[in-house]
Amino acid sequence: MNRIWAVALFTMREALWRKAWLPFVGLTILAFILVFVQFGASLTFSWQNPYADNIISSFFFFWSWGTLATGLILGCTSLPIERRARMMFTLPMERWQLIAGKLIGAQILLSALVLVGYGLCIALALRQHLPILPFSRLGLVTALCSIFVCLCLSIPLGLKLSSPAAGTLSVFLVLLPAFFEALASRGLLQEKWIVTAITYLLPFRVSTHPMNNAFWNSIVEASHYTKLGWSVLFSFLFFLILLTLFRRSELSTKS
Amino acid sequence: MKPVLEFLNISRSYKRGVVVLKDVSFSVGQGEVVALLGRNGTGKTTLINIALGLVKPERGEVRVFGMSPKTNAAAIRERIGYASEDGALRGGETVGELIAFHRKFFRRWNDALENELLNRFGLSRRDRIRRLSNGQQRQVGLLCAVSHYADLLLLDEPAAGLDPAARREFLETSIQLLNREGTTILFSSHHMTDVERLGGRIVLLDQGTVRLDRDLDRVRGEVCVAIVPRALAPNGDVFQHAAGCLRVRAAQQDWHVVIEGAPDDVRARLAGLIRNERIHCAAVPLEELFVELVGSERQEDL
């Protein structure tokens, strides 16, 4: 456990040195600009801003997507960097310990970031006398789960693939079912069984609606949490399968 | 001498069908310093990666401390130190952080050796890794590789890319110090000066096979190069069958025959073969010997 924790701590520290948080900062700045553009003159810090729920939701939307983008970059680059350097692979630990340490470190760091964003949103909402509704908590849980799914896919893929390939494949695995669903809903794909088959084959998709509209007054259904749970479970299974497959595989230093 | 590291009939090729190692066998005994020599691409790094369990041999077996890296990788790495030419230092932003990171992975840590090496290398724990020179980074890598009482040190081109002064300082203050502590060292290099400075034994890889495996002192005293005009022997095969012949190479107007034995003795033997006394025979420096053993044939002369 000490070894896993050592890797996790190093992952967190290194993420800060490597400036992996730059996409997050970029998206947050973009969020502020867009909020100003969208709400213009009505954006005052007075009590009871009529657009408060909209503004806070937009802020959390950009904050959480920025964190997710950071997670994807962290996830798909972490093992290719280690493969090139080789040093970590020559330390006395099993490969799964290294990968688990990377996952835990990145998840803790990014979860902390999302929680800070959520905390700011809660503070803003309280200042505007908005009720903290269950849907906002669902938004927070969705953001945390999305990060976990993203890391479970991108980190182990980095053991065999280059960073761009691991990142692209992770995005592809998550978005492919949604893409086919969109095609089917527009009548461009008649064979519904294809959509069903892909949904079963790639059950990693997370519905990001609660994350995108966290502070709007939407209704939480029990199925929201169930679906999130399944996505998390399946992505963790995918993570475990890759870990088992790559347990003793040869280390490619081409990355 | 008890073998610490054994390569038994190791063969390995890469996907594009390039054979890197063909039936390579040799062992490294306790406390030995062995230089793995060979041209670029002859499988030196592959062999070290096989010992570390990072690369698998297609055929053959490797045993480190009597264990297989396939099944006991973590236990083996507990007793191995590894440093390479191109390996980036991972684990911390400063020297102190890097050392602290590394010591979390080992049950034992030699604080006295760590401090001694820090002093010898003139490094401070607060030095930032990125601001250190190339040579200093190698020294930090070496410090992390050995301070856990490493029984076996695997060094892949440890001093490559350093200027001659830095190279000398690095080798003298580090590897010689460690070998005095009884650490077994296998290092790869294509710099003969490094090999001559460190002494020990050389294993020369050429075209995937072990071309030469013997103590450096014996190489210096017992191997020489005979130069025979090709006019005297149109076919070089005649030398291939001479006792102790290691290689026959065509070079311009001569045959260069690398052969075991003292120069006078070799001259007499070869003269008997071609019934001619016009043979120049001499013991040569290690670098010359390396070129003769692994250098290319000059196609235009064949």
Image (tube, rainbow, N blue to C red):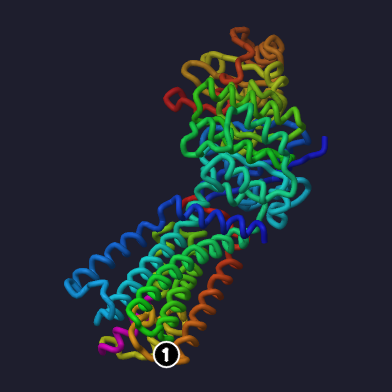
- Residue at image coords 71%, 23%: B243
Left or right of A131 on screen, residue B222: right
Q: Is residue B23 placed above or below B256 in the rendered structure? A: below
Predominant SS along the magenta part? helix
Q: Quadrant of the N terminus of chain B?
A: top right
- Measured as percent of width and height from the top left, residue B194 is found at 60, 24
Q: Is residue B216 left or right of residue A84?
A: right
Q: Residue tagged by mark 1?
A: A220
Count of labels shown?
Answer: 1
Task: Write down the region rendered in magenta.
Answer: A175-187
Which residue is farthest left? A41
Q: Chain of mark 1?
A: A
In the rendered view, would you say A210 is above or below B126? Answer: below
- Residue B16 seen from this side: no
**Residue type at the position of mark 1:** Val
Residue at 51 percent of width and 66 percent of height: A107
Q: Secondary structure at mark 1?
A: loop
- Taking the magenta stretch, the answer to whether it contains residue A185 is yes
Where in the figure is residue B122, as x and y percent of width and height?
58, 27
Check residue B36 for magenta coloring.
no
Q: Position of residue B6 (x, y in %)?
A: 73, 43
Q: Is residue A237 above or below residue B88?
A: below
Residue A94 placement (x, y as % from top left): 65, 58
B8 relative to A54 in the view: left or right: right
